[in-house]
């Protein structure tokens, strides 16, 4: 995958005089030239509002927008009418919480999730549970990210209305057995929402295969621009849902005191959407399909396996998550016993290496791991072994730098 | 690069600007890490975004700080700032501690201080480069914010929170 | 303003072999090169996720994102902590409807609006009224768009909790007396939400001067990209509001069963925002400020006045909205008694002229005007008199084309 | 451009391709604009996005269409499509009308029809260019959708809706 690096203009950038080594892909990915150009081309050649324009620009844009929807649908094996464009994963999950959940979760019902969720797949369910008098339950897990499937026997009951879980932890990299959980949830009549923010960009995902009812993901983590994301909803479920936001094209007929709704999925896209973002997401999907998601996955398995080995060289450093690369994505969270992750992050930045440091919007997981923050390096298609080497070697220097001992020569005072 | 200079120093020159020797020294050997018994002022600060925590106890005599106790947890900047702060507070009036805090915060916000103001901050000047690292500023000011909280509560007649 | 046309790459595009004449600005505006380049530059040089990154890219991006917020705040005379980035006007209004309104509208309360609202400022209030057992009242208006202020005496009562009204009708172009209405609403203790989708891009707007509590507008109608918009909320009101969407940076501390919220305004921006969009909106605001909103307004008054005169040449054509250009923006809706607007729109498109045709998401207003659709030409900074001439002359041809009479030579059969 | 051709025709050549003479003719003089008394089939169609409206009444004898009544409102494409349709329906069996409708819809969706299929559509072929105008397609098919609705309800034993 070395050859694709030239497709990403930012990779030739320098940071503090050093070449950029971008290892914060779980936060957001970089964009290939094709995606950036799709934005420029859209605004230089086509820009218009979508839907029902008689003019040429409007028709061109509507066509491209719906084409993008079809591409995204094909990418995850879904029908196009089940694809709703949102701002991102967070909005997608909130949409479900405000519509399907408000209508289907009753007092005494239960929502099942995991302790390793991103806040975006936890807080909406806290709100729903409280608003609807339902309760939130958690599938027990090991600190490595393995969910206790045996606990499902007792946790999944007829009162379970929804299982909301991540497909891949953004901290541990752990891939969850969504398919198995979905099967068992459906047996009990519960629906299944999958947070695919970390999985859809990195591993082949097919909603038919997973058999999930909802899948949420973000464009900006899969080569596309910020401000565009996707909620997939199984059409039979979508048909039963009330709209979320109201206004614009989502209505069919409107009177002063009432209204009827437009077709699916437009009914769930109120107001002018992020048109250019959606079209560019289509281009990003083309790019990924062209590489092949199997190859993307294979590349990250290689890189992650190599990194896991090299991280063992680091003294007093704990690496979280599963050791089996078949069960983890390209995310490595770690902690040094003596040096705070913030200091490591700042040191790395001075060498051009960008990692994320903090709680990664997964505070309950931090508590479970008994840390307040971790460092996190996360890979994508353009990362290479040499970058892993630089990461590990720079971490080694950093640890030496912050660890007591005469490793710095005295400096002139007032320097 | 001057000949004779250590290469590793030069490698991390910009970094050394942030991580002054004083900071690393206080980080590794934080001062006043005892719990002060029966304190007049008592405050805790927490930065949930980084997980930094600071607990502070102060004993006063004739309106001046006589003893300071500190328990801190977090990155080098937080810990060093807290540790150095405890040293600076000694023998100061509450008024003076608050002025110091304001000056330090101003420095962190990148405001230009006068020679005299810088003089008052003494060795806290070592933190001046932190203002170039927006994300680290709140690490540096956490101990001082905690101090101000404690003083405010003390003054509002609430001896212990 | 002729010289600025070169700043807009799309204006040199051809449509069906004719130069593009873009007169659909009320739907969405075109973008200057500076805005398009801001997007490319963002993705080629800086792209990272905002907030709390220790790495350089993240710091650069956070700085630019918050800088954009400050620019937008200055543009409308607001404090930065009152500026929430949304997808657009529709989301902004829905946010208020799901948070402030749910908490403050009680059974028996009243929401006051107008019959000329865009669906985006009507449907959310229909929903709230129904959900909360409140009622929706309408300020009477003339077909020209003049609101009956005298009716306010009886319509505004202590039960009125919110007055939600457009600052400029997207069909009639009518500018509403927001300031006067806000003053009287506040006297009764009601809050005031202004739909600024059509006003903020075109006339100087200052929230202190209007004294409104909420102001919603869309970036894409003011030179900025799609997918970014703004909700301004008076900070004293914002402080009392519960968050809308949940997840990501909007939380301060999160446990499995509860959470606390981050500072304003981040508390209302759940998930990764449209970072590039916000930054580019800042650039669009720079562009507009550089022109000067007074000059923008003056240009549109000139153009609209000219168009209103020329439209009188068109046979059997009704032009809607106020005749006084001081009271209207650059929007001209019209209907021909014999030729359907769709046919006019298609004809114009064949000559390169893009106008909008339809109900403009203002169906109740269509009913009031006793039409099912209108044609709508809407102007912006780059439009010129020659384009108005072409519009009127092409309309003339179109009317002739569709009106019975031997104006077409017989064509060979099977052509 | 052939010499001798009318300039105005050439000016609007592409447009004339859409607005065939037949379409403009039916638009200006829609056929069968009467209300049929005691109809067997009765249907109304509405496209709220354009405001187009079509009302249709059909009288059957021995399973064949004998009378068609139409009231339509909307753009030229809708009105001409409705008007031309009423002519085509005469003497057809319900089966045949539905086949016609499917063929017309297929043509509008840009599908390639066989010579024979095109033959069946007769003068409706004049609408073929509409498929290049996505937004206008639903105008052209509205009358036919309305017809299919009516037939479906008739067949489900519900004589009048
Ligand atoms: C697992 C997971 N879920 C949800 C999100 C939220 O995505 P977004 O911020 O794009 O809404 C993220 C991204 O940070 C994530 O990693
Ligand atoms: C007056 C008015 N309000 C609201 C909207 C909705 O804006 P958006 O589609 O950007 O959410 C529009 C734009 O069509 C408008 O003209």
Image: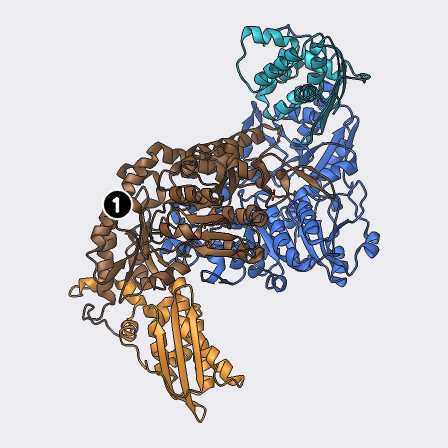
Chain colours: A brown, B orange, C blue, D cyan
The residue that label 1 is drawn on is A303
Residue A328 in picture, x, y percent from top left? 31, 47
The residue lying toward the viewer, choosing from C135 and C64, is C135
Residue B159 vertical position relative to residue D14 in the rendered view, above or below = below
Residue C291 can be seen in this image: no
Residue A366 in picture, x, y percent from top left? 37, 61
**Image side of residue A108 versus residue A333, left or right:** right
Residue C72 vertical position relative to residue A30 in the rendered view, above or below = below
Q: Quadrant of the C terminus of chain C?
A: top right
Which chain does the residue under circle 1 lie in?
A: A
Residue A136 vertical position relative to residue C291 in the rendered view, above or below = below
Give the quadrant of residue C373. Answer: top right
Task: Name the residue: 38% across, 56% down.
Answer: A140
Residue A343 can be seen in this image: yes
The residue lying toward the viewer, choosing from A378 and C345, is A378
The residue lying toward the viewer, choosing from A408 and D72, is D72
Task: Name the residue: 42% across, 70% down.
Answer: B46
**Image side of residue B74 versus residue C367, left or right:** left
Mark 1 element type? helix
For the image, the number of numbered tags is 1
Residue C94 in picture, x, y percent from top left? 62, 49
**Image side of residue A58 versus residue C114, left or right:** left
Give the quadrant of residue B93. Answer: bottom left
Q: Residue pushed farthest left? A: B4
Mark 1 nearby-residue class (10 Å; few <14, some 14–19, many ≥20) = many
Q: Quadrant of the N terminus of chain C?
A: top right
């Amino acid at each position: 995958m070395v050859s694709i690096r030239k497709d990403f203009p930012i990779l030739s950038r320098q940071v503090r005089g050093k070449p950029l080594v971008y290892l914060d892909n779980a936060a957001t990915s970089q964009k290939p030239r094709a995606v950036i150009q799709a934005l420029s081309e859209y605004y230089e050649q086509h820009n218009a509002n979508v839907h029902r324009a008689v003019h040429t620009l409007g028709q061109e844009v509507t066509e491209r927008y719906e084409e993008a929807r079809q591409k995204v649908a094909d990418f995850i094996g879904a029908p196009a009418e089940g694809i709703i464009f949102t701002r991102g994963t967070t909005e997608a999950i909130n949409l479900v919480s405000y519509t399907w959940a408000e209508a289907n979760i009753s007092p005494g019902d239960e929502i099942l999730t995991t302790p390793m969720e991103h806040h975006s797949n936890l807080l909406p369910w806290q709100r729903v549970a409280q608003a609807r008098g339902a309760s939130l339950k958690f599938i027990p897990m090991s600190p490595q990210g393995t969910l206790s499937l045996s606990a499902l026997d007792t946790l999944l009951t007829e009162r379970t209305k929804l299982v909301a879980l991540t497909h891949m932890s953004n901290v541990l990299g752990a891939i969850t057995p969504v398919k198995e959980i979905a099967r068992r949830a459906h047996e009990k009549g519960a629906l299944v929402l999958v947070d695919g923010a970390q999985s859809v960009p990195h591993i082949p995902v097919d909603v038919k295969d997973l058999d999930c009812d909802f899948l949420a993901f973000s464009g900006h983590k899969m080569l596309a621009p910020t401000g565009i994301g996707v909620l997939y909803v199984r059409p039979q479920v979508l048909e039963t849902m009330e709209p979320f936001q109201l206004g614009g094209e989502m209505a069919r007929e409107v009177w002063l005191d009432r209204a009827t709704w437009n077709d699916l999925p437009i009914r769930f896209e109120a107001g002018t959407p992020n048109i250019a973002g959606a079209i560019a997401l289509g281009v990003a999907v083309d790019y990924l399909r062209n590489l092949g998601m199997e190859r993307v996955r294979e590349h990250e398995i290689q890189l992650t396996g190599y990194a896991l080995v090299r991280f063992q060289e680091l003294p007093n450093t704990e690496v979280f998550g599963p050791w089996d690369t078949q069960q983890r994505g390209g995310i490595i969270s770690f902690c040094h016993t003596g040096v705070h992750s913030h200091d490591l992050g700042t040191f790395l930045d001075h060498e051009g290496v960008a990692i994320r440091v903090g709680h990664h919007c997964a505070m309950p997981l931090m508590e479970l791991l008994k840390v307040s923050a971790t460092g996190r390096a996360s890979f994508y298609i353009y990362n290479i072994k040499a970058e892993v080497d630089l990461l590990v070697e720079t971490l080694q220097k950093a640890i030496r730098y912050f660890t007591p001992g005469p490793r710095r020569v005295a400096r002139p005072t007032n320097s | 690069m001057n000949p004779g200079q250590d290469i590793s120093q030069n490698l991390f020159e910009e970094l050394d600007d942030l991580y002054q020797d004083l900071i690393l020294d206080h980080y590794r050997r934080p001062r006043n890490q005892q719990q002060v018994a029966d304190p007049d002022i008592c405050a805790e600060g927490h930065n949930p975004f980084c997980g930094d925590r600071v607990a502070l106890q102060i004993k006063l005599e004739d309106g001046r700080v006589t003893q300071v106790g500190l328990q801190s947890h977090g990155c080098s900047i937080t810990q060093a700032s807290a540790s150095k702060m405890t040293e600076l507070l000694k023998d100061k009036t509450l008024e003076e501690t608050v002025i110091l805090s304001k000056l330090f915060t101003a420095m962190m916000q990148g405001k230009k201080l006068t020679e005299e103001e810088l003089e008052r901050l003494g060795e806290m000047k070592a933190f001046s480069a932190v203002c170039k690292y927006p994300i680290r500023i709140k690490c540096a000011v956490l101990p001082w914010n905690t101090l101000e909280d404690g003083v405010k509560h003390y003054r509002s007649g609430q001896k212990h929170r």
